[in-house]
Image: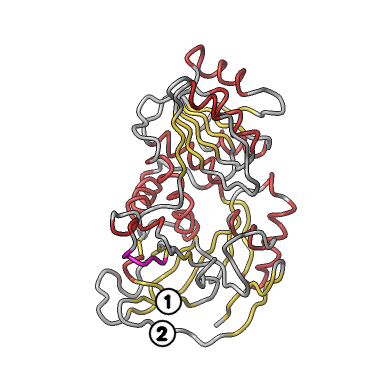
Amino acid sequence: MKRATMTAPGKIEISEAAPPSPGPGQALLRIQRIGVCGSDIHVFHGKHPYTSYPVVQGHEFSGIIEAVGAGVSNVKPGDKVTALPQVVCGQCPPCVRGDEHICDVLKVQGFQAPGCAQQLWVTAADKIVKLPDSFSFEQGALVEPISVAVHALTRAGKLAGRRVVVLGAGPIGNLVAQAARASGAGDILITDLSEHRLEIARRCGLPNTSNPSKEDLKTASRRVFGDKGFDLAFECVGVEPTLAAATENLAKGGTLVVVGVFGEKPRMDLGLVQDRELKVFGTLMYQRPDYEQAVAWIASGDIVTEPLMSEHFPMERYLEAYQYLEEKRDQTMKIFIDVA
C-alpha cells in the first residue's frame, strides 16, 4: 500500500508499506479523503511545537471499514466512517472527569502519533463515528473541522439570540459562524482580510461580512448590531490584532472564545477584561458528542459544505497540495487529498 511520510519540514515521501491488520478492539479503514488544515502546515514548516519527524500526517478524513478485529461490534466492513484522532490515557484527572480531549498525555494522530495518510489504516474502533450513506467522502472529511467549531460553541454557553462576531473567515471561522447560526444565534458578523473568503461566507448563508482593511470592527459592529453591539466573539485567526479588536469592542459582560492557534504570544489588555467583566475561554479540539452534532448538522443542511471545497490532489502529489495552499492561502478554503 502507499503511504505519505513527512520526513523533514517541507519534505514528503510516498513509499510502499505492508498493509496493517486490525487487532482486538481495532478496525482497518480504507482511507478515501484527507483534509489539509492549518496545523498540518505548521508541521510542514517545522513550526509545530509538539511534532517530530518523520511523521505520517492526516487527522481529518473519511474512509470505509475494510475489516474489524476481535470484539468489535459497533462497525462492520463496508461502513462509511470517520474517527476522532485523539489517543488518551483514560486515567489522568481530565480523562477521569470526562475531558479526554485535554488528556495530560494527549497524542493526536497525524502529529504525535501516526496519522491516516496511507491507503489502509488501523485505529481504535471506539473512536470511529459512522457516516450516513448519503455523505460524500468530502463531507466525511469535513466532520473533524466542523467538530472544532461545535466544541468552540459549547464553551460559550447558550447561543440563542446572542449577537456574535467571528474574527477570521477561513475554514474554521466560517464553520464557527455556521455552527452559531445552527445553534440559534441572532445576528452574526464575520470578518476577514480576504475578499474571497468573505464571498465564500456569503455563499454559505452568512450575509454580514466585513473587511478590517476597509472597515474597523467598531464601525462594522454598529452597522450590523446597532448600539447594542455584540456580546459574543470567536477569535479564529490567532494573531494579536484580532484578539485586541475583539477585547476592545465586546459589550460589557460579554464572552470571548479563543479558537485560533497563536504562533507568537500575544499581549492582551486585562484591564479591559477586568473593568468590563469579560469572560475569556479557550477551546481545544472536540469530544465525541461534537462529532455526532457535526454529522447531524451536515445531514440536515444546517452546515453548508459545498462552497468550502476548493481543490483535490491525488496522493502522489501530496507535497503539491501543501505548496498550493501556501501560494493561494487567501484564495483557498479546504484542500483534499484523494487517497482512493
Marks 2 & 1, CB-CB < 8 Å contact = yes
Give yes or no for residue 283 being in the magenta stretch: no
> Farthest bottom residue?
18
How packed is label 2: few (under 14 Cα within 10 Å), some, or many (20 or more)? Answer: some
Number of disc labels: 2
325 or 221: nearer the viewer: 221
Give yes or no for residue 89 being in the magenta stretch: yes
Q: Is residue 165 above or below residue 36?
A: above
Disc 1 is placed on an element classified as strand
16 or 263: nearer the viewer: 263
Magenta extent: 87-91
Q: Is residue 168 above or below residue 213?
A: below
Distance CA(mark 2)–CA(mark 1): 7 Å
User: Amino acid type of disc 1?
Assistant: Val
In the drawing, does residue 308 fall left or right of residue 24?
Answer: right
According to the image, label 1 marks what residue? 122
In the drawing, does residue 214 fall left or right of residue 178?
Answer: right
Q: State the image coordinates of residue 284 (x, y, percent, origin top left).
A: 46, 50
According to the image, label 2 marks what residue? 21
